Amino acid sequence: MTDPAKIRRDTLAIVFLTAGLYLALALVSFNQHDASLSAASVPEGAVRNWGGAAGAVVSDLLLQLFGIGAVGFPLICLLLAYWIYRGGGGLEKWKRAAGGLLAVCSALGILSFFTGHVSIFGQDIFLPGIAGELLGRQLLGKLLSTAGGVLLLTALLLFALMLATGDPQSGIPALWRREKPSEEVRAMVKEKLVP
């Protein structure tokens, strides 16, 4: 007997998988001369985007709003497909996705303080996007100055990474450091300091 809950779960996973792959194809094949919300002077049938006219519009919209952070959207969709297919906690996967989106936005806000338009593969892209520019320089930069804005956005990024990974930040250093007894660490420091 088939389980309707499993069928719904698998269907939702397939929807997110398809969305993630489609967004990835549309973003990879983005061409700023395709007809979209910001460029309308293209002859009929000359769309170069692998996602067609819809892919041209979606990729243009994502790149305008989120700049380089647009690559996070296919990734979030693919991760949601994986988490949904695996099963697990209902709310947990959505908290992780929200953490991923928050991480993208806070990273773009930080980026807005340091960069602007760049050319990637011959395409002119506003790296932080409109969302990063508004959150970073226009909002927090004016309220807290550059240093305060970067500091707050860095704290927000760390919080978002905790949400996205499900791990506390205190556990991250243990990933790359080997635990050594304090006496062994002191001996190593003394050895480095004494000529």
Image: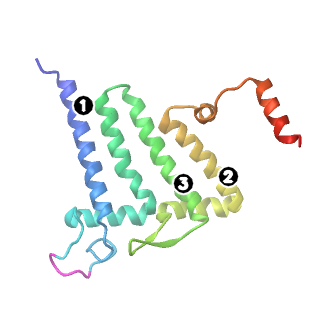
Q: Nearer the viewer, residue 181 or 13?
A: 181
**Residue 68 rendering spot, x and y as whole percentages:** 45, 61
**Residue 181 rendering spot, x and y as whole percentages:** 74, 23
Q: Which residue is mark 3?
A: 107
- Residue drawn at point x = 26 percent, y = 82 percent: 41
Which residue in the rendered view is the most extreme toward the top?
Answer: 1
Which residue in the rendered view is the most extreme toward the front?
Answer: 195
- Residue drawn at point x = 38 percent, y = 45 percent: 76
Q: Which mark is residue 9?
A: 1
Q: What main secondary structure does the magenta stretch of the protein show?
A: loop
Mark 1 nearby-residue class (10 Å; few <14, some 14–19, many ≥20): some
In the figure, is residue 134 to the left or right of 24?
A: right
Q: Which residues are magenta?
A: 41-45
The amino acid type of the residue labelled 1 equals Arg
Q: What is the basis of the colouring in this image?
A: rainbow
**Residue 142 rendering spot, x and y as whole percentages:** 66, 64
Which element is circle 1 on?
Answer: helix
Mark 3 to mark 2: distance in Å?
Answer: 12 Å
Mark 3 nearby-residue class (10 Å; few <14, some 14–19, many ≥20): many
Mark 3 or mark 2, which has the lower sequence index?
Answer: 3
Q: Which residue is mark 2?
A: 151
Residue 49 versus residue 97 in the image, above or below: below
- Residue drawn at point x = 50 percent, y = 63 percent: 128
The amino acid type of the residue labelled 3 equals Ala
Q: Nearer the viewer, residue 35 or 189?
A: 189
